[in-house]
Image (cartoon, rainbow, N blue to C red):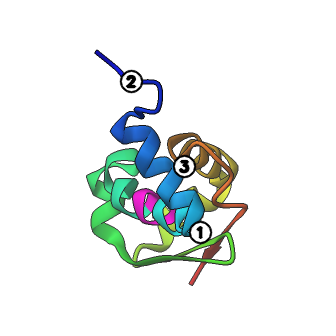
């Protein structure tokens, strides 16, 4: 039997992330960890460096061909990553 002030673990963790202002960093980390699953192993294996700073996703790709392909579809990639996070975590992609 649930009591009136009981909350689920999901709600408690979500509230804790908001109270301690960790939500943005948590979402950024989840995007970085899901990168190979969203983009596939071929692109993930050629991604040498990936990080997020000020809502910008920085990528170092070793293949110029793949880099050019990603530049052409960058808005779709940003949209997919933000959908995964559930909020706007990334606004821009920068290729190093």
Would you say residue 42 sits in the magenta stretch?
A: no
The mark closer to the camera, 1 or 2, is 2
Q: Pick whichever, 2 or 68, lies toward us.
A: 2
- Asked if 79 appears above or below 90 in the picture, the reply is above
Tell me the SS state at disc 3: helix
Q: Could you say which disc has been placed on residue 81 in the image?
A: 3
Q: Going from the N terminus, do you reach mark 1 or mark 2 first?
A: 2
Residue 21 screen position, x and y as percent: 59, 68
- Asked if 61 appears above or below 37 in the picture, the reply is below
Tell me the SS state at disc 2: loop
Q: Which residue is mark 1?
A: 21
Where on the picture, by quarter, is residue 56? bottom right
Q: Going from the N terminus, do you reach mark 3 or mark 2 first?
A: 2
Where on the picture, by quarter, is residue 53? bottom right
Image quadrant containing the N terminus: top left
Residue at mark 3 to residue at mark 2: CA–CA distance? 37 Å
Overall secondary structure of the magenta section = helix
Q: Which residue is mark 2?
A: 3
Q: Going from the N terminus, do you reach mark 3 or mark 1 first?
A: 1
Query: Given contact means CB atoms under 8 Å apart, are the residues at marks 1 and 2 in contact?
Result: no
Residue at mark 1 to residue at mark 2: CA–CA distance? 28 Å
Q: Could you say which disc has been placed on residue 62 in the image?
A: none
Q: Look at the image and give the residue range highlighted in magenta.
A: 27-31
Q: Residues within 10 Å of mark 1 (few under 14, many from 20)?
A: few
Tell me the SS state at disc 1: loop
Drawn side of residue 71 relative to residue 6, left or right: right
- Asked if 76 appears above or below 88 in the picture, the reply is above
Q: Residue at x 63, y 58 (%)?
A: 89
């Amino acid at each position: 039997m649930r009591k009136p002030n009981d909350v689920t673990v999901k709600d408690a963790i979500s509230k804790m992330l908001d109270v301690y202002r960790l939500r943005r960093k948590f979402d950024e980390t989840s995007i970085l960890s899901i990168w190979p699953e969203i983009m596939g192993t071929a692109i993930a294996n050629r991604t040498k460096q990936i990080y997020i700073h000020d809502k910008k996703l920085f990528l170092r790709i070793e293949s110029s061909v793949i880099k050019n392909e990603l530049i052409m579809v960058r808005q779709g990639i940003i949209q997919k990553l933000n959908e995964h996070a559930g909020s706007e975590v990334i606004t821009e992609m920068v290729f190093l």
